[in-house]
Amino acid sequence: MENFTPVAALAGGAMIGFAAVLFMWLNGRIAGVSSIVGGLIIPDKANLPWRAAFIIGLISAPILYGFFGGPVTASIPHSSLLMLAGGLLVGIGTQLGSGCTSGHGVCGVSRFSMRSVAATFTFLATGILTVFLVRHLLGWG
């Protein structure tokens, strides 16, 4: 929390919310990233263009920001194997939870979906428990 900037966080949250509303309004679909990526893995030709455009936008936005907005620095203090394991667990979790934080947490909760409220609570509780176990009990990171 050393570098927390409330204005930037509020602006980012507002932009994510606006993008989710705009996506729903223009496409009639929930902006759940795991479902959108999943639709690219087993492609449906009718939905392939918008799914690809969405993912290209997710990837290109930080690149464009770095180009126009200044340098972006990031450091990953963990091994590639640990990152791979984390990614695999996230993928399994999105399948078990029938969606990800963008689908449930941003879009589902705002539509008062009780399933999404339960999923988001589970995401947050699991994340808090994991950080407590890994950092405080195991002493990693």
Image (tube, grey):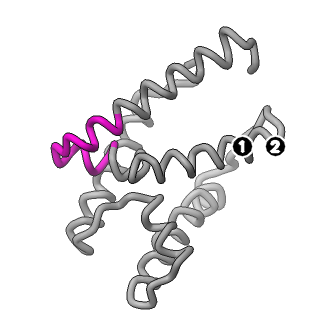
- Classify residue 19 as left or right of residue 50: left
Which residue is painted at 52% across and 78% down in the image?
42
| Range of magenta residues | 105-120
Q: Within the magenta stretch, is there residue 74?
A: no
| Numbered tag placed on residue 81 in the rendering | 2
> What type is the residue that disc 1 sits on?
Ala
- Residue 127 place in picture, x, y as percent: 51, 28
Q: Within the magenta stretch, is there residue 114?
A: yes
Q: Are marks 2 and 1 in contact (CB under 8 Å)?
A: yes
Q: Secondary structure at mark 1?
A: helix
Which residue is painted at 34% across and 30% down in the image?
121
Taking the view exactly as shown, the residue that stands out farthest to the top is 137
The residue under label 1 is 85
Distance from Cα at disc 2 to Cα at disc 1:
6 Å
- Answer few, some or many: residues within 10 Å of disc 1's Cα (few below 14, many 20 plus, some between 14 and 19): few
Q: Secondary structure at mark 2?
A: helix
Residue 21, placed above or below residue 40: above
- Classify residue 119 as left or right of residue 100: left
- Occupied quadrant, residue 134: top right
Taking the view exactly as shown, the residue that stands out farthest to the front is 96
